[in-house]
Amino acid sequence: MRKVLVIAAHPDDEVLGCGGSMARHVKEGAIVHSVILAEGITSREAKRNREAHREEFALLHQAAQRANDILGVHHLKLLDFPDNRMDSLDRLDIIKIIEELINEVKPNIIYTHHSGDVNIDHRRIHEAVVTAVRPIPGNHYVEELLFFETASSTEWMTPGSAPVFVPNWYVNIENTLALKLRALEAYAYEMREWPHARSTRALDYLAKWRGANIGVQAAEAFMLGRKIIK
């Protein structure tokens, strides 16, 4: 039985980036684990204060659980790294947590952020995941490493400032796009009105455009980091 591990920065990133693929994996019989590393709220103020947002955290965690339940995710884990402040942490501390997650789940496939996103948490997590899955002999259960695009972050990075997202791996989500959009609706607090890039309508258009890239009704696009054929 194949195992999938999604490592995302904030609640909603996992659905934005690969929600349709997650639901497809579930339908195909895989065990899907979703891990969200940062808490997703306190960056909206000048100074981090978790206690001031206790009710908001509870609501956001409930939304995350609903969204992942809609996709059929088997295991959801929410950690509490500081929101949009992960560059203030030692990279090794992030790597160690991700290594523990990988050793616990032993995934065949990992999805995580693209390296060129405008959001600093996305970039730090990308770097930590790449380090954590380095191909140490005898420890090769991660067969596929895929980097997803995150609406309102990946496409907002300016040209020449970071690596560009140029997809070379697509997943047909014709049969799971509706689940992805329903899961996004569970994150109503995080979503925005059209024409914002993080609106349900924009995500529907993006999925159909990525589908048109490969001649299907809807798709999610990724950059392949590594593929090991055993």
Image (cartoon, rainbow, N blue to C red):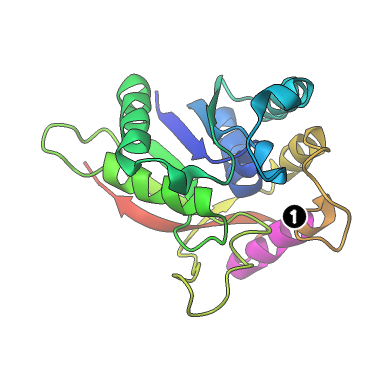
Kindly identify the residue that appears in the image at 63 percent across and 36 percent down.
48
Magenta region, residue range: 203-215
Expressed as whole percent of the image width and height from the top left, the position of residue 61 reads 69, 23
Q: Which residue is situated farthest in the front direction here?
A: 47
Kindly identify the residue that appears in the image at 77 percent across and 36 percent down.
187
Report the front residue among 214 and 147. Answer: 147
Expressed as whole percent of the image width and height from the top left, the position of residue 105 reads 37, 23
Q: Secondary structure at mark 1?
A: helix
Q: Which residue is situated farthest in the left direction here?
A: 137
Q: Is residue 39 above or below residue 214?
A: above
Report the front residue among 81 and 74. Answer: 81
Q: Amino acid at mark 1?
A: Leu
Q: Is residue 177 above or below residue 221?
A: above
Q: Which quarter of the rendering shows the N terminus?
A: top left
Mark 1 crowdedness (10 Å alpha carbons): few <14, some 14-19, many ≥20:
many
Kindly identify the residue that appears in the image at 69 percent across and 66 percent down.
209
- Answer whether residue 210 is visible to the viewer in this image: yes
Expressed as whole percent of the image width and height from the top left, the position of residue 211 reads 65, 61
Q: Quadrant of residue 217?
A: bottom right
Report the front residue among 181 and 50. Answer: 50
Expressed as whole percent of the image width and height from the top left, the position of residue 26 reads 57, 29
Q: Is residue 197 magenta?
A: no
Q: Which quarter of the rendering shows the C terminus?
A: top left
Report the front residue among 204 and 125. Answer: 125
Q: Is residue 168 above or below residue 82?
A: below
Kindly identify the residue that appears in the image at 54 percent across and 79 percent down.
159
Q: Quadrant of residue 135?
A: top left
- Answer whether residue 146 is visible to the viewer in this image: no
Left or right: where 58 falls relative to 116: right
Q: Which residue is situated farthest in the right direction here?
A: 193
Q: Find disc 1 in the rendering and name its residue.
A: 203
